[in-house]
Image (cartoon, rainbow, N blue to C red):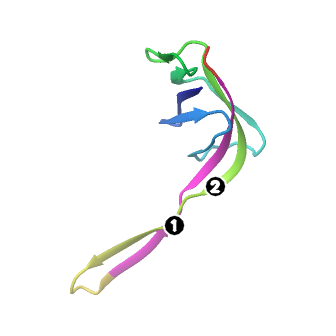
Amino acid sequence: MYAIFRAAGKQFRAEKGMTLELPLMDVEPGSTLTFDEVLLASDGTTITAGAPLVKGAKVTAEVVGLAKGPKLYIFKFKRRKNYRRKTGHRQKYTAVRITDVKVG
C-alpha cells in the first residue's frame, strides 16, 4: 500500500513505516501531520489516480525532527583576475515517519 502526495510544492511517495525528508516546516518534533493532497493511491491490487486529487485519501505522519543534507561547496573563479570565492551550503529538512496511508 502506497500513496503519492504533495507537500510544500513537491511530490513524495509514501509507504507505512517509511522515513522521508520534506522541505523545512515550522513544526515541533513528535507532532502529527496529515497530508490531504493525495495524487495517486494504491492498495496493492488497484491503483487510484486522482483528477487532480483522490477523494478521501490521506497520509498521516509523525515528525521525527530536523535533518540536514550534505554539505555543498560553491566555488566562483575568474582566471587571471585574482578572483576566488568559496562558500558552502547545507540544506535543512524536516524528517517525518509515515504512520498511516488511507486510500479512501
Q: Residue at x 55, y 27 (%)?
A: 3
Viewer-proximal residue among 27 and 37: 37
| Marking on residue 9 | none
Residue 33: image location, x then y, percent = 69, 33
Determine which quarter of the picture holds residue 82.
bottom left
What residue does disc 2 label?
67
Amino acid at circle 1? Lys
Residue 16: image location, x then y, percent = 66, 33
Quarter of the picture holding the C terminus: top right
| Marking on residue 71 | 1
Residue 56: image location, x then y, percent = 61, 13
Chief secondary structure of the magenta portion: strand
Verify whether residue 99 appears in magenta: yes
Q: Residue furthest left?
A: 80
Q: Report the span colored magenta.
A: 84-101
Residue 85: image location, x then y, percent = 38, 77
Verify whether residue 16 appears in magenta: no
| Gap in angstroms between the C-alphas marked 1 and 2 | 12 Å
Give the structural element (helix, strand or loop) at label 1: loop
Q: Residue furthest right?
A: 30
Quarter of the picture holding the N terminus: top right
